Amino acid sequence: MSFFFLDYITFVFFCAMGAIQIGTSIGKVRGLLLLKSRVPSFVLGISLILGSIIWFFLSEDRNISDINGGLDANTQAVGFFLGSLIAMILTLIISSIFNSGFKVTKVDQIHTDGIESLYEQNYFSAIKTELAKWNKNWNQSLSEQFSDLPKGIIYELGIKIIARLR
């Protein structure tokens, strides 16, 4: 693994972290903000992106062909994926720690599901709330998921799979 690859992952990480902060501050998703207020989070996002661009492109000569020691497309794709994934995971962890005051005391107080619940609480609280709701009504939730399937489709699919395996 080259230092250029690690630098690229670091560059993507900070750009993705900045983009997440800009998006969450514009979208008013308080549960993912790293800072308590939207405006400082927006400024943090812009400075992360600009700082990483300045560092990455001005610290060394990065305009290198892949046959001369640069990154080929596959390596760039892996680096982009890893940098973005690490940025998302760390954003979820750090914002949940910093925004621990957004906890909801009762499960029934949250009226939104999915990512919309991050408007009112942090990520770990949202996971805990969803698991509590699901644990309370797991059979109703499962029946809603499969209620629009035609009758006997599971049985028919099982028969087809068994017939192919014979």
Image (cartoon, rainbow, N blue to C red):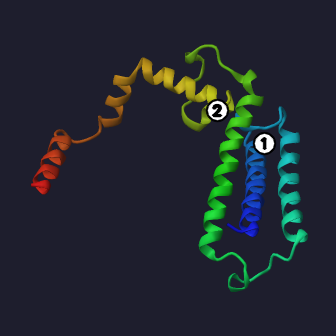
Rendered location of residue 16, percent (x, y): 73, 54
Judging depth in this view, the residue of 60 and 27 nearest the camera is: 60
The residue singled out by tag 2 in the image is: 123
Q: Is residue 159 visible?
A: yes
Rendered location of residue 92, percent (x, y): 67, 38
Question: Is 158 rendered above or below residue 9?
Answer: above
The residue singled out by tag 1 in the image is: 25
Judging depth in this view, the residue of 124 and 148 nearest the camera is: 124
Rendered location of residue 67, percent (x, y): 68, 85
Which residue is pictured at 90% across the width and 70% down the height? Answer: 58
Q: CA distance from mark 1 to mark 2?
A: 16 Å
Task: Left or right? Give the position of 123 relative to 13.
Answer: left
Tell which circle, 1 or 2, labels the residue nearer the N-terminal end: 1
Q: Quadrant of residue 95?
A: top right
Which residue is pictured at 17% across the width and 51% down the height? Answer: 161
Q: Is residue 30 visible?
A: no
Characterize the local packing of mark 1: few (<14), some (14-19) or many (20 or more) Cα atoms within 10 angstroms.
Answer: many
Disc 2 residue type (three-letter):
Tyr
Characterize the local packing of mark 2: few (<14), some (14-19) or many (20 or more) Cα atoms within 10 angstroms.
Answer: many
Residue furthest to the top in view is 106
Q: Quadrant of residue 111?
A: top right
Question: Is 64 rendered above or below residue 48?
Answer: below
Disc 1 residue type (three-letter):
Ser
Q: Quadrant of residue 120?
A: top right
Question: Is 61 rendered above or below residue 32?
Answer: below
Judging depth in this view, the residue of 21 and 81 nearest the camera is: 81
Task: Left or right? Give the position of 126 relative to 145.
Answer: right
